[in-house]
């Protein structure tokens, strides 16, 4: 699991087996229920128990702004730090031809259809500042251009090579509101 190394995983397993078997059973049941009951939003691809996630089904959000992120954790980080009131599209990754991840695996056909509907006026690209994130951002900017939608990308404040879910709220908020157009 991301963020948990071999030694930490071993300590967790031993703790549950030695001191908290009831907790281990509860964790197992919760994970099984999550796997069985949680899917993807039909609109934005966020995790949800319903057809539409809470953000897509909320009234009062700005439907002219669409923020594209790599993961559900990025949505939560932006929601917690920025006060953004638009909508999101979750890629569930980034373009990586060497790993066999292309536009189809990221649901970019659905994004292209959404942009073609004409309601979105700004596509905010909030991919991670990595080589793959940059390549994905350029691809997304091209999609937006073809749909005649303005594209911007979050700017300064996020360290090069960093990932959004690990950036503190103040830095992420500053970067989000300091976004610039993609050239």
Image: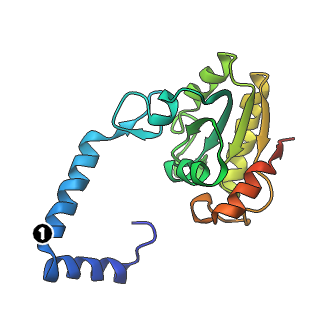
Q: Is residue 132 above or below residue 3?
A: above
Quadrant containing the C terminus is: top right
- Please tell me in which quadrant of the rendered image residue 20 appears: bottom left
Classify 20 as above or below 108: below
* Above or below: residue 126 compared with residue 44: below
For the point 59% across and 37% down, the residue is 88
Give left or right: position of 175 versus 42: right
Residue at horizontal 23 percent and vertical 77 percent from the top: 13
Residue 2 placement, left or right of 173 = left
| Name of the residue lying farthest toward the front | 60
The crowd level at tag 1 (other Cα within 10 Å; few <14, some 14-19, many 20+) is few
Say if residue 130 shows up in the picture: no
Q: Quadrant of residue 137?
A: top right
Question: Which residue is more in the foreground, 7 or 18?
Answer: 18
Position of residue 63 measured from the top left corner of the image (x, y, whole percent): 64, 26
Please name the residue that numbered disc 1 is placed on.
22
Q: Is residue 161 visible?
A: yes
Could you tell me residue 44's position as x and y percent?
52, 33
Q: Is residue 114 above or below residue 135?
A: above
**Residue at 44% from the left image edge and 34% from the top image edge:** 53
Image x and y of residue 115, in percent: 66, 23
């Amino acid at each position: 699991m991301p963020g948990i190394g071999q030694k930490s995983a071993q300590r967790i397993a031993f703790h549950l087996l030695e001191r908290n078997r009831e907790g281990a059973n509860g964790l197992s049941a919760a994970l099984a229920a999550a796997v069985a009951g949680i899917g993807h939003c039909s609109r934005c691809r966020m995790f949800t128990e319903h057809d539409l996630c809470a953000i897509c089904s909320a009234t009062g959000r700005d439907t002219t702004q669409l923020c594209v992120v790599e993961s559900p954790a990025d949505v939560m980080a932006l929601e917690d730090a920025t006060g953004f009131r638009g909508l999101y599209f979750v890629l569930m990754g980034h373009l990586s031809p060497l790993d066999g991840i292309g536009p189809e695996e990221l649901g970019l056909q659905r994004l292209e259809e959404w942009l073609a509907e004409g309601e979105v006026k700004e596509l905010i690209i909030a991919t991670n500042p990595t080589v793959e994130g940059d390549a994905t951002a350029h691809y997304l900017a091209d999609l937006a251009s073809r749909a005649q939608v303005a594209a911007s990308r979050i700017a300064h404040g996020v360290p090069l090579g960093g990932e959004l879910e690990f950036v503190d709220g103040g830095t992420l908020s500053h970067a989000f509101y300091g976004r610039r157009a993609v050239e």
